[in-house]
Each structure stands twice: as C-alpha cells, then as structure tokens.
Amino acid sequence: MSDLEQLYQQIILDHAKERYGNKPLIGDTGQGRSPLFGSSHQVNPTCGDEITMEVEIDPDTGRLAVRWDGQGCSISMASASVLSELAEDLDAAEFEEVREAFHELMHSRGKVEADEELLGDAAAFQGVSKFPARIKCALLSWMALKDSLAQARTAGGSQ
C-alpha cells in the first residue's frame, strides 16, 4: 500500500470515528430553523446503512448549514462527515460543483484522479471507487444532501 493510500485510509477512519456535523436533528418541529430548510432520509437497502441529512440555506449569504444522523459502515459515516465539513463554507451552487466531482470520482472505478483542491478530504474516497459494492455507501449522504437542498429551494420559492 502506498503512502497516499495509507493517508487516505487514515482520513476515512478518522472521519468515521470523529463524525463532523453529526448533531441532533431539528426534524419537523420547525423550532429555530430557517424557512429555507430541507431534510432527507436515505437507506442503502444492500447493506442497511441509513442517514438523515438536514440542510438550511442562510437567506442572507446563501451558505449551507448541514447536520445529520445515521448509522452504517465506516465508509458511509466518514463520507457524511467529510461532506458536512466541505459543505459548511459553500453555497448551493458551489456544493453542486463539488457533488458532481465526487459523483464522477465514485463512478470512475479508480480511473479518475481526485481533484484534492476541489474535494478536500473527499479525495480520500478515490480508492472506494474501485469497489462497486461500496460506492453506494460513499454516495448515500451526498444523495441525501442533494435531496435536502432541492426541498429547501422549493420551500424558499427558488429552484
């Protein structure tokens, strides 16, 4: 195993253990949440991984606030953690660029080199793309956030 592969493996393990953005959810109560709010619950039926992702779009800056709760393998939990950390400083359009790059990386079967500048710690999942059974694990939270954003945009009246 190369030094880079070991580093990537360590990043995934660290994020699986110290889950960034894994916070209590607001849910349907509406208490203390922005009107630009969306929530999505996703399940990977192949392995049973589950995640609920919530997003709020700041009406003034357009920046995203993400929180999630879930259970599953280290890859799905680490991916949610990395995603939450990345999304923190992005607006919806910037997130979409990152999401597309991650999606392309996950479906590359290891043939696409990760853009570390754009993807940050998400580049660590490059090796996961070589294992088709694990790709859904890595993408679960990304699909949940995409769905949450669509809901938040609809709630805010902009699409």
Image: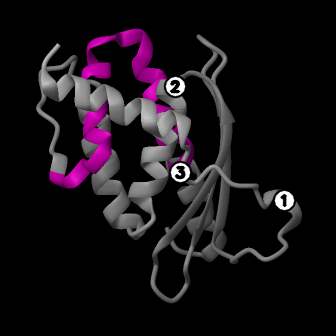
Residue furthest bottom as drawn: 60
| 81 vs 84: above or below | above
Q: Are marks 3 and 1 in contact (CB under 8 Å)?
A: no
Name the residue tied to disc 1. Answer: 28
Q: Which residue is mark 3?
A: 20
Name which of mark 3 and mark 1 comes first in the sequence: 3
Taken as a whole, is the magenta stretch helix, strand or loop? helix
Mark 2 or 1, which is nearer the eye? 2
Verify whether residue 124 appears in magenta: yes
Are dots 2 and 1 in contact, CB under 8 Å? no
Q: Secondary structure at mark 3?
A: loop
Q: In percent of the image, x 56 and y 44: which residue is there?
A: 19
- Secondary element under disc 2, as helix, strand or loop, is helix
Residue 155 drawn at (x, y percent): 66, 69
Quadrant of res 86: bottom left
Query: What is the x, y in percent for residue 31?
Result: 85, 73
Q: Residue at x 26, y 14 (%)?
A: 130
Task: Read off the magenta span.
Answer: 117-145
Q: Which residue is at the front of the view, 51 or 116?
A: 116
**Disc 2 marks which amino acid?**
Ser
Q: Residue 10's quadrant in the figure?
A: top left
Residue 135, image x, y percentages: 40, 21
The amino acid sitting under disc 3 is: Tyr
**132 up-or-down from 53: above or below:** above
Give the answer, above or below, for where 133 lies relative to 77.
above
Say which element carries label 1: helix
The residue that mark 2 highlights is: 74
In 3D space, how far apart are the residues under numbered discs 2 and 1 (Cα atoms)? 28 Å
Q: Residue at x 32, y 41 (%)?
A: 122
Residue closest to the far right: 29
